[in-house]
């Protein structure tokens, strides 16, 4: 767990900053009554649904793009360390958590809570704060996933596209591949 945090600290910091930033905006509203919370829920539910829908679609797309990243990295002449594949696996795991969380929130927001007459007015305030806190967290998770993906892609570009000597490049296995290719060429002649 500590290595995950160390390897992805910039992405995690970015997600935490986004969560705090959106959360602070919520708390600037101050103390609201149950009636105000009910009204604000009615007004904001369509936007919250759209946010969750967008995050669900984006996280599903990211999972599909990870397959492309894996095919590009495995098809390259360079040999990557296990650390690179663990990085991609971490992105996939984090993205699945984001996907499931957003889908659950999306379903929750489709429950007609604001239209119900059986819910005590005081509960709307609690529901409102939970709703805003959860969307702040999901937004922070999305930013974390995007930053993790950015790091993986820039590593891949540095290794494959720019041919740089990179810490995720396995030199021993790359040297073996070069020797094998030289032997094939010599055997053909």
Image: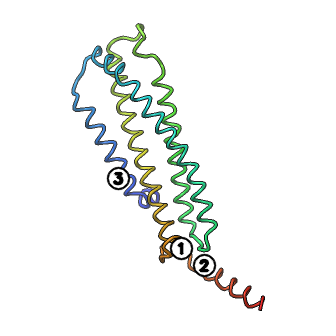
Label 1 to label 2: alpha-carbon separation? 8 Å
Q: Nearer the viewer, residue 66 or 13?
A: 66
The picture places residue 3, in percent across and down from the top left corner, at: 46, 60
Left of 134 or right of it: where is 111?
right
- The local secondary structure at tag 1 comes to loop
Bin the neighbour count of mark 2 within 10 Å (Cα to Cα): few under 14, some 14-19, many 20 and up: some
Residue ID for mark 3: 13
Report the residue at 58% width, 49% height from top: 64
Q: Residue at x 74, y 85 (%)?
A: 184
Per the model, the C-alpha gap separating discs 1 and 3 is 26 Å
Q: Nearer the viewer, mark 3 or mark 2?
A: 2
Figure check: 171 above or below 4: below
Secondary structure of residue under mark 3:
helix
**Residue 174 image offset from top left, x and y in percent:** 60, 78
Q: Are marks 1 and 2 in contact (CB under 8 Å)?
A: yes
Question: How many neighbours does mark 1 have within 10 angstroms: few (below 14), some (14-19), or many (20 or more)?
Answer: many
Image side of residue 181 versus residue 63, left or right: right
Q: First in sequence, mark 3 or 2: give its number.
A: 3
Compare marks 1 and 3 and give the one earlier in the sequence. Answer: 3
Q: Is residue 135 above or below residue 124?
A: below
Give me the disc on residue 169: 1
At 46% from the left and 37% from the top, the residue drawn is 54
Residue 1: image x %, image y %?
47, 55
Helix, strand or loop under label 2: helix
Q: Toward which corner of the image does residue 177 lie, by quadrant?
A: bottom right
156 shown above or below 124: below
The quadrant where residue 25 appears: top left
Return the residue at label 2.
174
Closest to the observer, 139 or 154: 154
Quadrant location, the C terminus: bottom right
């Amino acid at each position: 767990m500590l290595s995950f945090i160390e390897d992805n600290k910039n992405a995690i910091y970015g997600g935490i900053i986004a969560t705090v930033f959106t959360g602070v905006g919520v708390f600037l509203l101050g103390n609201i009554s149950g009636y105000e919370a009910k009204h604000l829920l009615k007004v904001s539910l369509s936007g919250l649904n759209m946010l969750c829908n967008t995050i669900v679609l984006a996280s599903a797309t990211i999972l599909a793009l990870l397959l492309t990243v894996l095919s590009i990295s495995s098809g390259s002449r360079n040999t990557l360390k296990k650390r690179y594949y663990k990085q991609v696996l971490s992105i996939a795991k984090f993205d699945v958590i984001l996907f499931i969380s957003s889908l659950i929130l999306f379903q929750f927001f489709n429950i007609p809570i604001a239209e119900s007459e059986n819910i005590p007015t005081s509960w709307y305030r609690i529901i409102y704060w939970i709703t805003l806190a959860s969307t702040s967290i999901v937004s922070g998770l999305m930013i974390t996933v995007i930053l993790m993906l950015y790091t993986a892609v820039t590593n891949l570009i540095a290794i494959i596209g720019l041919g740089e000597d990179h810490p995720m490049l396995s030199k021993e296995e790359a040297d073996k591949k070069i020797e094998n290719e030289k032997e094939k060429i010599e055997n053909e002649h």
